[in-house]
Image (tube, grey):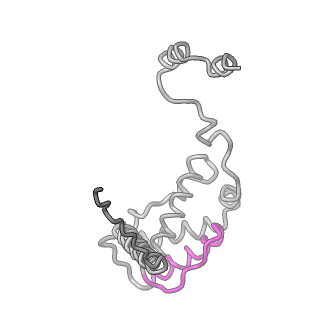
Amino acid sequence: MAKQPMIEIEIGNEEEELKGMDEKYKSEIEMGKEEEDAGFMSLLQGVTLSPKPLTGLVNALNKVLPLFGAPTISGKELSVDVVRGLAMVAQAVSDAAETEEIPMELSFSLEDLQGGDTAAQMVAGKLDRLSKTGSFRKFLKAKPTETSTPSNQEPMGDPMAMAKTEEQSPNIEALFASRM
């Protein structure tokens, strides 16, 4: 009779393995956050603002952030939080201007700040005005319309080709009915 090979089963400590995995994921999350922060800061690469215009910009941003349910920003430096807040507001303003909820003149982008102190003062003025604009508040409180959800949108593509595909595809309901 041939000798059967022995099978060894190693029983490890699951808690140690979980701790190791937990630490690994935490470090990956931290690295991701650092990369994201660096990406946001790169949007304002080369922008230097004097203390007074920067303080005005942060104060104006702090007037708008509560409309989003976001906390205000403490500190008066050009931090990642300031850049994130400005990017968020700029996108919302762009969306609101597209739907004609607010005047297009209130639109701004982070690239505008490349203009230095004068540009920062102009953006701060727009933010201040936004904080007092009722239609912008309504826009932020409004729920997205059903027509904007992907499931309710018309499919994109050539209508003739899509009609031909529908003709050639089997009727799912008929297939299920035939199985009954």
Q: Residue at x 61, y 70 (%)?
A: 64
Q: Residue at x 35, y 71 (%)?
A: 38
- Horizontal placement of 115 versus 179: left or right? left
Find residue 78 and report its horizontal and vertical position in percent. Answer: 42, 79
* Of residues 151 and 54, the one drawn nearer to the viewer in this rendering: 151
- Horizontal placement of 41 versus 161: left or right? left
Q: Is residue 35 magenta?
A: no
Find residue 49 and report its horizontal and vertical position in percent. Answer: 38, 79
The outermost residue toward the front is: 1
- Horizontal placement of 21 versus 103: left or right? left
Find residue 46 and report its horizontal and vertical position in percent. Answer: 29, 72
* Of residues 45 and 179, the one drawn nearer to the viewer in this rendering: 179
* Of residues 17 and 144, the one drawn nearer to the viewer in this rendering: 17
Q: Is residue 57 magenta?
A: yes
Instruction: Specify whether residue 115 is in view.
Output: no
Decide whether the magenta segment is chiefly helix, strand or loop.
helix
Find residue 85 and report its horizontal and vertical position in percent. Answer: 51, 70
The residues colored magenta run 52-77
- Horizontal placement of 143 versus 30: left or right? right
